[in-house]
Amino acid sequence: IISRSGTLTYEVANSLVKAGFGQSTAIGIGGDPIIGLTLFEAAMLFEEDKDTKAIVVIGEIGGVMEEQLAEAYAKGKITKPIVAYVAGKHAVPGKRMGHAGAIIMMGMGTYESKINAFKKAGILVARTPYEIPSLLSKVI
């Protein structure tokens, strides 16, 4: 699991365990603009890990990390299956969110831009966090 949301990490990990899936590692990169790893960098760590069979990405509005990850996946830089969820579908444009990372600029970083990028790259996208286990079962 690679997540920009701490609370959703716990929820998704719990739903995966209940569905019979384990986790080799969970990385919380946070949602602020300054972070230690990007989604792509974390995904590359999982790409190299023999115990990881698939990658679950929990993204959120703001920034362009999800779009960058989707582009890398489309180019074949990441070959392990990815299932993604993006939080923030109902966020009001222009309204300040919980942290500085939820900044949307010039059409990038929106819920729609992230979903479209993932789908265009061939990444399965969950409508809710609880749909992730059923999508994961389709790719591994």
Image (cartoon, helix red, strand yellow):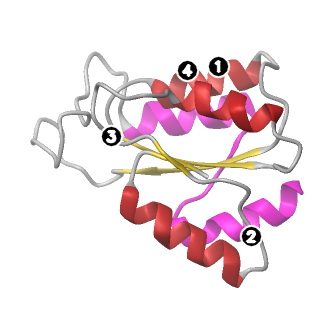
Question: Mark 4 and mark 3 in contact (Cβ < 8 Å)?
Answer: no
Task: Of the two numbered discs 3 and 2 on the same chain, state the one appearing first in sequence.
Answer: 3
* Residue ID at (48%, 69%): 10
**Is residue 14 positioned above or below 90 on the image?**
below
Q: Tell whether 119 sits left or right of 129.
A: right
Q: Please give the label number shown on residue 31.
A: 3
Q: Nearer the viewer, mark 1 or mark 3?
A: 3
- For the magenta stretch, what is the residue range? 111-140
Determine which residue is flagged by label 2: 134
* Residue ID at (70%, 32%): 45
* Residue ID at (86%, 50%): 51
Question: Mark 4 and mark 1 in contact (Cβ < 8 Å)?
Answer: yes
Q: Please give the label number shown on residue 68.
A: 4
Question: Mark 1 and mark 2 in contact (Cβ < 8 Å)?
Answer: no
Residue 58 place in picture, x, y as percent: 51, 50
Disc 1, SS: helix
Determine which residue is flagged by label 1: 71
Disc 2, SS: helix
- Quote the CA–CA distance across marks 2 and 1: 24 Å
Q: Nearer the viewer, residue 9 or 126?
A: 9
Task: Of the two numbered discs 1 and 3 on the same chain, state the one appearing first in sequence.
Answer: 3
What amino acid type should be assigned to the residue bearing mark 4? Answer: Gln
Question: Mark 2 and mark 3 in contact (Cβ < 8 Å)?
Answer: no
Residue 54 within the magenta-colored segment of the rendering: no
